[in-house]
Image (cartoon, rainbow, N blue to C red):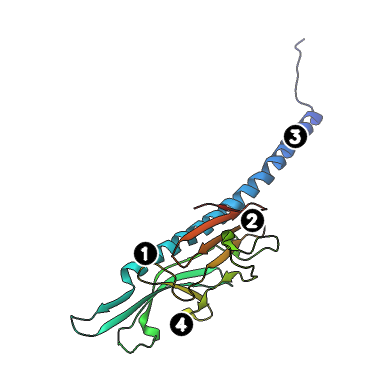
């Protein structure tokens, strides 16, 4: 007689249980890594947007002469941030009619982005050092610090703005500015100083660590 062997129901249950256990053990760290990676990507993209806006301010900011006449056209580059939606945009104002008034039709969007719904939002956890990237400023509960109200035009309604001058320095408040980004588990911060240095940092749980 031939000896026939097979897998019993108990063996199948044990194998399935082991697979489920190993999957669960691997799944939690992977999910943590995945969420942190998405958060860092969102923060990094915003950091690069600030740097790009700075370069545009150095190219397009200041004034230009109109048709070699004596008229000087003012030009400004703003970074506008919506703390509620997580959206942001780089906007140019160009005073085409030369009246010094920021009219609605003189604003144009150069670049825009979002922190990503469900990935990240502007926020500040209670345990985080409130000086973005440990920049030496006093603690503040403001999620977006030292940004100014945007010009009162429809495109920027309800948002907070900051601006670089044509040399790449901060102009609106001339103070250290910063904003905090979180997914409610991890946190990143972007700090901007008056000299135009823009820093991205990650909160380790005890201190801010330089990212770039």
Please give the residue where the numbered disc 3 appears in the rendered image.
18
How many neighbours does mark 1 have within 10 angstroms: few (below 14), some (14-19), or many (20 or more)? some
The reply, left or right, for residue 125 in relation to residue 54 is right
| Foreground pick, 111 / 118 | 111
> Separation of disc 2 and disc 3 at Cα?
31 Å
Residue lying farthest right?
10
Residue lying farthest left?
68
Tell me if residue 100 comes above or below residue 15 in the rendering: below
Which is more N-terminal, label 4 or label 3?
3
The reply, left or right, for residue 108 in relation to residue 21 is left
- Please name which of the two marks, 1 or 3, marks the residue nearer to the observer: 1
Asked if disc 3 and disc 4 are in contact, CB closer than 8 Å, the reply is: no
> Separation of disc 3 and disc 4 at Cα?
61 Å
SS category of the residue bearing label 4: loop
Asked if disc 4 and disc 2 are in contact, CB closer than 8 Å, the reply is: no
SS category of the residue bearing label 3: helix
Please give the residue where the numbered disc 2 appears in the rendered image.
186
Q: Residue at x 75, y 17 (%)?
A: 4
Residue 143 in sight here:
yes
| Foreground pick, 106 / 174 | 174
How many neighbours does mark 2 have within 10 angstroms: few (below 14), some (14-19), or many (20 or more)? many
> Separation of disc 1 and disc 2 at Cα?
30 Å
Q: Residue at x 30, y 84 (%)?
A: 96
Residue 106: give its label: none
Where does the image place residue 160, in percent across and percent down from the top left? 52, 76
Residue 55: give its label: 1
């Amino acid at each position: 007689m031939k000896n026939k062997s097979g897998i019993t129901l108990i063996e199948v249950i044990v194998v399935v249980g082991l697979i489920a256990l190993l999957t669960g053990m691997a799944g939690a760290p992977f999910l943590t890594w995945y969420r942190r990676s998405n958060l860092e990507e969102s923060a990094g993209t915003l950091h690069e947007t600030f740097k790009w806006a700075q370069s545009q301010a150095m190219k397009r900011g200041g004034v230009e002469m109109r048709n070699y006449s004596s008229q000087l056209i003012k030009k400004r580059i703003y970074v506008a941030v919506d703390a509620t939606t997580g959206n942001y945009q780089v906007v140019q104002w160009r005073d085409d009619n030369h009246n010094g008034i920021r009219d609605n039709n003189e604003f144009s969007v150069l670049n825009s982005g979002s922190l990503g719904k469900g990935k990240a939002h502007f926020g500040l956890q209670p345990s985080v050092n409130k000086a973005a990237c440990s920049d030496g400023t006093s603690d503040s509960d403001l999620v977006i610090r030292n940004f100014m109200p945007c010009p009162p035009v429809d495109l920027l309604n309800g948002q907070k703005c900051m601006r670089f001058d044509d040399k790449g320095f901060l102009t609106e408040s001339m103070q250290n500015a910063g904003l905090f980004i979180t997914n409610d588990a991890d946190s990143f911060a972007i700090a901007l100083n008056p000299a135009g240095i823009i820093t991205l940092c990650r909160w380790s749980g005890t201190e801010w660590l330089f990212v770039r």
